[in-house]
Amino acid sequence: MSKKRSAVDRAFERGLAALINSGEPEVLQGGRKGVEKESLRVTPDGEIAATPHPRALGSALTSSNITTDYSEALLEFVTPTFRSSWELLQYLCDLHQFAYQHMGDELLWATSMPCALHGDESIPIAQYGSSNIGRMKTVYRQGLGNRYGRIMQAISGVHFNYSFPEQFWDAWQHIRDGRESRQDFISANYFHLLRNYRRHGWIVLYLFGVSPAVCESFLAGRDFKLPRLKPGTAFEPYATSLRMSDLGYRNRNQAGLRVSVNSLDEYVRDLTRAISTPHPEYEQLGVKVNGHYQQLNANVLQIENEYYSFIRPKRVARSWERPTKALLRAGVEYVEVRALDVSAYDPVGVNQNKLRFLETFLAFCVLSDSPFIDGAEEIELDRNHLAVAHRGREPGLMLMRDGRQTALRAWGHEIIESMEGVAEILDRGDAAKPYATALALQKVKLDEVSLTPSARLLTEMRETGESFFEVSLRMSRLHKEYFLALYPPNTERLAEFAAGAAESLAAQQAVEAADKVGFDEFLAAYFND
């Protein structure tokens, strides 16, 4: 181990010891947790649904619980934040049951990677009504389709939102002798976390990636050539998450875009530059062609959310406030982890052990030493993520660390062993030790590669003879049966969802009635604010 790495480890151990001895036994407990989970609506035979967003689920524009992502068929389930992961997952389960009660014979696709595609035109763009903000959301998606193709936008995922408890920030600022304002300290430390997530986040792809295969229809018209596992199914033998590779979200169009996470100011600077700098290729597409918008603008990014990253710093924005403006106004409030594939082995796409691991991992990232990332290291880190996405289960895979080659397996053990002290704090007062259990379940995957969900999915296809489409459709049907058979249903919460859906429809009407200017003027004001 290098002297640099030894110093980093000692700094982490000192910080962890200080936190343990802080006099706050529950210092890390009670962080706020939320999930955004995407799922394609499909027909009983697995085709993307061409039906409108079900009205009984409410307005996709104004609902706080069920909206749509890129496509009219791509549902997004959004939970409030909870202090415990079991409450969070119960809420997510209730949302799925509510949705299935109002979807007729349609299914929710059980995997991240879509199937049965018939080109871009088979994927309907989400519609949000006639209001200016609704039209803006649809035009933005039109632009995404024109820039990257609609097929890529049909991929779904699970996003984990997390904020540390207030007592942690009190203790940590005292330990670190932070002299800046409380919010400046919090923002700086969230960026501390972001840098370490970029360094170590490859482990999330290895442990939880479950998209090693795709339908061949996903590759139609694209440059990628993958081996064939069986007719209709392409794969990479050692892949963990093709969703998070350059085949999916890490697309080549944004390969040259660099957004610094060394500070809040640099992050906002780089995103602001990207949303205000014209891109020659996008200029050729045109913005308003024959009276119809093809994209919001011809800049490198139309808006901040177009930037695809594994993790984002976030602040709840005011009405129609841009994300960067919200961050500058009040600092970082929480982080959004975006690297989780939808798991076909969990009816809601995620489970408690996964969320507990992530919570522990985020604490490890904020407690560990986190020097600034320069250009050379950023390239190194991007290559690590791509290597694990494409070849994470390859025997003897080596990653780059501080300019030297390091075995994935050894590095992974080091990370999880460092996390054990964090799990001990999170488990205080709970005899079941759920966080330590979550770590132990993941640690064994480093030695037993067959236990990773990506390996499990490939093994299942080989043993059953099913294609990726067939296994995904089977699991989708099983999940529907599970949710509709749940008894007794949480009638109070289901009634709450129904009332919320009705309120959101009324809220959309109010938004539409409140518009006082034309769409062109609205867009100009939004981008000039």
Image: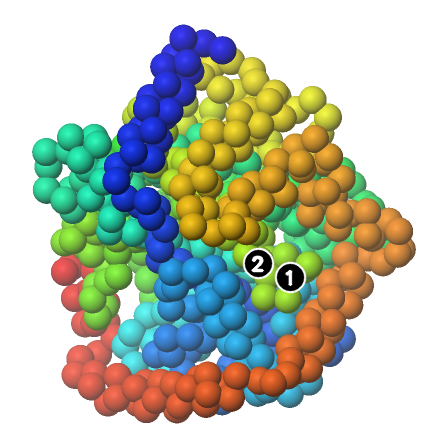
Q: In the rendered view, does 269 fall on the left or right side of 459?
A: left
Image quarter hosting the C terminus? bottom left
Instruction: Please give the label number shown on residue 57.
Output: none
Check the image and tell me how it is coloured.
Answer: rainbow
Q: Residues within 10 Å of mark 2 (few under 14, many from 20)?
A: many
Q: Is residue 85 visible?
A: yes
Residue 241 screen position, x and y as percent: 62, 44
Q: Amino acid at mark 2?
A: Val
Q: In the rendered view, does 149 fall on the left or right side of 512?
A: right
Residue 380 screen position, x and y as percent: 47, 24
Viewer-side residue, 472 vs 7: 7
Q: In the rendered view, does 476 fall on the left or right side of 123?
A: right
Q: Which residue is mark 2?
A: 350
Viewer-side residue, 493 vs 212: 493
> What residue is at 32 percent from the left and 24 percent from the top?
14
- Against 350, residue 16 (above or below) is above
> What residue is at 24 percent from the left and 62 percent from the top?
317
Q: Which residue is mark 1?
A: 346
Viewer-side residue, 46 vs 394: 394
| Quadrant in which residue 464 is drawn | bottom right
> What residue is at 75 percent from the left and 50 percent from the top?
457
Tell me if label 2 and label 1 are in contact, CB under 8 Å. yes
| Quadrant in which residue 320 is drawn | bottom left
SS under mark 2: loop
Residue 441 screen position, x and y as percent: 63, 43
- Against 142, residue 389 (above or below) is above
Q: How far apart are labels 2 and 1 at the CA level?
A: 6 Å
